[in-house]
Amino acid sequence: MKKQKIPFLVTVLCLLVFGTTQIANAQTVFETTLSGSNEVPTVTTSANGSITATLNGNELTVEGSFEGLSSAYAASHLHAGMAGEAGGVLFTLNATVDADGMGGTYTTANNTFTLSSGQVDTLEARGIYVNIHSETYGAGELRGQLAPQADVVFRTNVSGAQEVPVAKTMASGALILELNGDSLFVSGSFNGLSSNYAASHLHTAMAGSAGGVAVTLNATVAADNQSGVYLAADNRFELTTDQKEALMNRGVYVNIHSENFASGELRGQVTPPVTASFFASLSGSAEIPSANTNAGGAVVVELTTDDSLVVTGTFAELQGDFDASVAGGSHLHAGHSGTNGMVDILINAEVEANLKAGAYLAKDNKFAVDASQIETLLNRGYYVNIHTTTFGAGELRGQVLGDASAYFKTNLSGLHEQPTPVITEAFGAVNVEITGDRAIVTGGFDALSSAYAASHLHSGSVTASGGVEVTLDATVSGDTSGVYEVSNNTYTLTETQLETMSSQGLYVNVHSQTEAAGELRGQLLFGDNLFPEKSSLLTPIDNAEISIAGDVSTNLVATWSASSDIEGDSLTYTWQAATDSLFADIIINANVGSDLNYNISYGDLDTILVDLGVESGASATVYHRVIASDGSDETSSDTRSVSMERGTLTSNENDGIDAPNRFVLDQNYPNPFNPSTKISFSLEEAAPTQLVVYNMLGQKVATLVNERLSAGNHTFNFKADNLSSGIYIYRLQSANQSLTKRMTLIK
């Protein structure tokens, strides 16, 4: 490893001014394939092109073409910078632009440049790239690194997202590899490591798997020890026949190790040049519904210049057997994250004998695609699905996303809402791709209980609610379903927002008309997610018999053991009670944050029993469980039952005749109600009075009265338009006296 005292681009600028070598007269041909995947940050586009640059002495001629820009051509240049880094303009290229403005050509007659000796050195060091700018992508839509003509050229973008397991880092980089005979030349750069650089290698294994070291790379490391470059002069290697075969078959990856991530902080699967590169990490969490499995894998999808898809990668540790009887066992489905779609392409797995692992080889998985399929791919509308005998609908799923430095993902559920979970059949999922300061949000939701109202990215931990950071733009269908499309949901984030995202401090919230505070929520977590461990209920014990009698303020206390999360994600707990073991009829749905207990008074339990029609002296069986959630996936404890006998309670409440000059709180009417109800009470004397409504967590949701009232009868109307279904407590306080009752909102 070489220690570089000043950044590489500064060195390049010095070369441009002073030069270091004598200019030879030999002719050298440089080539590059233009792709948005080569941009810094990456751009996912179907535009493509190629450039040939010929160096004669110090004269450089450029020719080539491009097509398919997403918007009108703006400009193009030769820039100074290694693969993976952005640099300044050296020369302006002169394109003959097509009539539609989306393509063009370069002729040598209009693109001949005289280079300084330093610029020649920079070119030969692979330090010059072509950049084509469009109106939509002002920083560049197509880019290609100029490298000497070779038998085969390869490329890769490196990120923590491709590590096995995922490395939680925002670092990035890119490399190009040239194969001439048995000789391999490697060049490129990386930046933003979370700690000091340790080492880097070429390993042999396909995407989704880890393999042994084939070649040790020689990085020229910057003074900060967290960025560096690979110079071709320092990275020439002679490959064996097996190593060349692995390289041709997408079986080689770059791995950059740091002190914090000894097994690797940045990884990139090496592929031939592409029109666009995509990546899908495979997990059970991405299934609908989520599959609780430790299986995993990854797939690289290449969109090639001949309008084909090449699918390669691996999967392992399936819980069930790979099930080839389900139309071959694995497919590309058409559907956004959070939605299910039909099979579009059957992908061919080479499955191991135990049926628990397999690989997708390039030779078996190249498919011609049409314009509509390419559009679906660009819109993140494909997912990989692997079916097993245990999970017939799919054990592993992965959304095919554009190349990015990091991916954040979440499943949407009413259970994740704070402070009160929402009971809903709605569901969904969202992915966020981070490239530089750009965030691309895609996914979908379905089956809202009422018409969609809005959705946002909020700041807040898994146990809290916070303010809106980004307003999302859903394409809604049928009022209650929707998807987030790339074109409408690409945002530039501030540095603070990026830091909050990186620390898993953002969540998605989907609001509906009846659940204005939010019906679906999901915490955006770094990469794929594994389920939390199961908690164990401690009290009440299973089959306990409890008499709800005596002091109304006595508490029933439910307690449980702490869960754990293998990824170290923060957890929140929800205690649920229901009249049935399947929890179809939930009567208590209480989120307690990180607490390991839930308290409910006998008075509140008595009200629930009354609502259930349980007469005094009779009993009812109540089932309860606790759910541990990381804000995206959850694990339920085993279910326990409790027999509750409705006894006689003693309290200071007076439920007699509503007579003047007595302190009385009446039951609200109607009850249950939706969306409004009347609450009546009597005061014995004039006094400052409060009538406040709380949810089952004891959090204030409304203040109906906060003033001095006269003695006598009073009635107030309570509107619950912005509250979710559930049981609420209303409390009357006046002249050092207080009364409490419960009411039920059903929407």
Image (cartoon, rainbow, N blue to C red):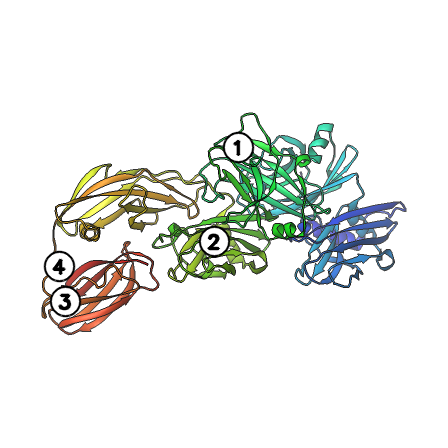
Q: Secondary structure at mark 4?
A: loop
Q: Secondary structure at mark 2?
A: strand
What is the distance, in whole Å, between disc 2 and disc 1 at their CAs?
Answer: 28 Å
Instruction: Kindly check if marks 2 and 1 are in contact, taking CB atoms under 8 A apart as contact.
Output: no
Q: Earlier in the sequence, mark 2 or mark 3?
A: 2
Label 4 neighbour load within 10 Å: few <14, some 14-19, many 20+: some
629 to 521, vertically: above or below? above
Label 1 neighbour load within 10 Å: few <14, some 14-19, many 20+: many
What is the distance, in whole Å, between disc 1 and disc 3 at their CAs?
Answer: 71 Å
Residue linked to disc 1 = 323
Quarter residue 182 falls in: top right
Residue linked to disc 4 = 653
In the image, which is nearer the foreground, mark 2 or mark 1?
Answer: 1
Q: The C terminus lies in which quarter of the figure?
A: bottom left
Residue linked to disc 2 = 445
Q: Earlier in the sequence, mark 4 or mark 3?
A: 4
Instruction: Kindly check if marks 2 and 4 are in contact, taking CB atoms under 8 A apart as contact.
Output: no
What is the distance, in whole Å, between disc 4 and disc 3 at their CAs?
Answer: 15 Å
Give x and y (percent) for residue 38: 68, 50
Q: Earlier in the sequence, mark 2 or mark 4?
A: 2
Give x and y (percent) for residue 208: 58, 37
What is the distance, in whole Å, between disc 2 and disc 4 at their CAs?
Answer: 46 Å
Q: Nearer the viewer, residue 709 or 608?
A: 608
What is the distance, in whole Å, between disc 2 and disc 3 at their CAs?
Answer: 50 Å
Instruction: Kindly check if marks 1 and 4 are in contact, taking CB atoms under 8 A apart as contact.
Output: no
Q: Amino acid at mark 1?
A: Asp
Q: Earlier in the sequence, mark 1 or mark 3?
A: 1
Residue linked to disc 3 = 735
What is the distance, in whole Å, between disc 1 and disc 4 at their CAs?
Answer: 64 Å
Q: The N terminus lies in which quarter of the figure?
A: top right
In the image, which is nearer the foreground, mark 4 or mark 3?
Answer: 4
Q: Amino acid at mark 4?
A: Glu
